[in-house]
Amino acid sequence: MFKQDVKATFTESLEDINIIRNASRGFKSTLEFDRNAYELMKKRAEREFNQRLLWAYKGKRIFVRADQFGDKQVPNWIDSIIYRLFEVHKITPREIERLMKHIEKRGFMDFPQLDIKKSLIGLNAIQQKKEQESDHIDFIRLAVGLPPSDILFTDKRRKAEIVELGLDKKYKCHVFSGTPEDLKSFKELIRSL
């Protein structure tokens, strides 16, 4: 039964993303359309988180589904968090209700790691970029590394995404890549300290 549950949900979390990608193929989008699609992706993630949390709270089995990326499977990020909340941190029913209300009201704004990860996933979806396992590894690394950092180095593509989303300003972090211009800017920043 468990294998059937996991198999049935391999691609569940990517369905909306793929629908948006397929519907917008060949479509020249506007900035307003992209902004709305991006916000939709973030809201969808918040709603999915609360739905899974409620499902686990109502006594269903807690298991970590797998998401399929090409020929690779990775643990579903929502299920991984909820599993830890229940099994490791022993979250209480009252705390679950407060968390759900908080997410309904404020989204992931107060949870930097979730905010950053879903922002990057949403941006990639509206830009119709195919997601690979390595992209999600990058998203996780950035989600964990950006909030506590004053300076962060990443590749040129990820830096551009972070800057486009304004995450560098939001989390007050200087983000650099290995380009000559960025290395020069980094040296200037170090000299100014």
Image: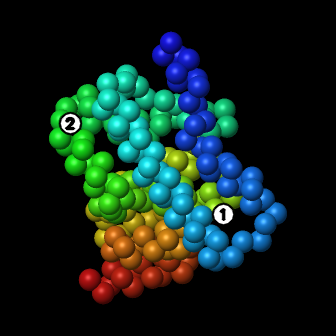
Sequence-wise first label, 2 or 1: 2
Is 45 situated above or below 67? Answer: below
- The answer to whether residue 8 of the structure is visible from this angle is yes
Q: Amino acid at mark 1?
A: Gln
The residue under label 1 is 127
Residue 27 as seen in the image, left or right of residue 50 = right
**Image quadrant in which you'd find residue 4:** top right
**Image quadrant in which you'd find residue 28:** bottom right
Q: What is the C-alpha distance between the residues marked 2 and 1?
A: 39 Å
Query: How busy is the neighbourhood of tag 2: few (under 14 within 10 Å), some, or many (20 plus)?
Result: few
Q: Give the residue drawn at x 32%, y 60%.
A: 105
**Image quadrant in which you'd find residue 116:** bottom left
Residue 33 as seen in the image, left or right of residue 89 = right
Q: Position of residue 59 (x, y in %)?
A: 32, 24
Task: State how the image is colored.
Answer: rainbow
Is 34 situated above or below 68? Answer: below
The residue under label 2 is 93
Is 178 situated above or below 97? Answer: below
